[in-house]
Image (cartoon, rainbow, N blue to C red):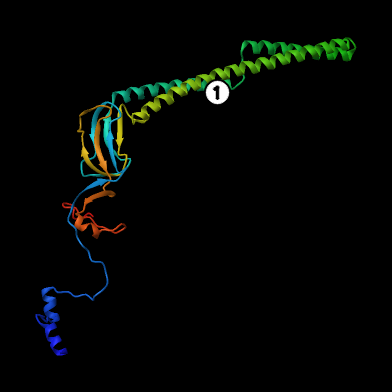
Amino acid sequence: AADKDDEHSQEGAIEVSDETAEMIGIKTEPAAKGEIEDTIATTGRVLVAPNAQAVVGAKSDGRALRVLAEPGQRVSAGQVVVVIDSPQVAELRGQLHEAQSKLRLPEQNRARTARVENRAAVIQSKNRMDLAEATLNRKRRLAELGVAAGREVAEAETEFKNAKAEYDYQSNIQNTRAQQEAAREVEQAQAAVVRITQSLAALGASGGGQSGTINVTAPISGTVVDRHVSVGEAVNQGKELMTIMNLSNVVIEAQLPESQANRVRTGQRLIARIPGMPDRA
C-alpha cells in the first residue's frame, strides 16, 4: 500500500537536474515560516496629513520678479520660492532709514548731557560758591591775625555752605532735566524705528533689504504641487502663489467591501499601492 501511495504522489512530477534548473532560471529556497501577502483591490483616496500642506501667499501688493520653484520640485522650509517687488515695502524702508538717521542725534544729545552741563544757573551758583569760599578763607586768615572776630568767620562759613548747596542743587537739577529730555527724545525715535520694522515684518520683509524686494519663503518642507504666479505678474495682498505638500506623511482612506472587512483587523500592518505611483506605498 505504501508503494501505491508513493506512485500516486509522483504522478505528474517532473524531475529537473541542477544544470537544467540553472539554465531555465529555476531557484529553490528552504521552506521557512513567514508572512503571506494578500491583496485587496478597492477604491479610496490619499489625503495629506494635518499640518503637511501650506499655501504660500503674498503679504503685500507688488509684482513677481522671480519664481524659483516649479510644480513637482522639492523645497525646504525657509527656502525662497518667490521674489516680489512691493512699492509699499520700498516706502517703509525709506521711512526706516530716515528714522534711524533721526535716532543718532538724540543719542548724541543723551551722551552729551551725561556730562556736567555748563548752563547759566549752574555757572552763577558756581561763582557765588567760589566767592563765598574765598571770603571764608580770608576771614579765617584775619581771625588768625586777631583782626576778624569769630562771629565773622562763622557767618562766612554759613554763607559758603549755602552757596555750595545751591551749586550742588543747580548742577543736579539741570543735568537731570537735560538727561530726561534727551532720554525722552531717544525713546520716541526708537519707537518710530521699532514701529516701521514691525510693519515690514508683517509684510514678510526685513529692514535690511534692497528697495522694495520681498523674499517669500516656503513655510514647510515638501513638494510644490501647484503654482499660481508667473514672472512679471502683478500680485495682490493675499493672492495664493503656490501650494506645498509634504507627501512623506499621508492619510489613506479606503472603502472595503463588506465581504472583505473581516480580513482587516485593528493594529494590522497594511501596505497601500497606488496606481501610477508603484514605487510608493
Q: Which residue: 80% across, 11% down?
A: 156
The location of residue 200, given as percent across then percent down, is: 36, 27
210 vs 13: above or below: above
Q: Residues within 10 Å of mark 1 (few under 14, many from 20)?
A: few
How many numbered discs, if any?
1
Q: Name the image quarter holding residue 210.
A: top left
Q: Is residue 168 left or right of residue 229?
A: right
The location of residue 35, given as percent across then percent down, is: 26, 66
Q: Which residue: 30% across, 34% down?
A: 215
Q: Is residue 133 visible?
A: no
Q: Is residue 260 left or right of residue 49?
A: left
Q: In the image shown, does 279 or 141 lie closer to the viewer? A: 279
- View extreme (right): residue: 146
Which quarter of the rendered picture does the N terminus lie within?
Answer: bottom left
Q: Which residue is mark 1?
A: 111
Secondary structure found at label 1:
helix
The amino acid beneath tag 1 is: Ala
The location of residue 15, given as percent across then percent down, is: 11, 82
Q: In the image shown, does 246 or 38 lie closer to the viewer? A: 38
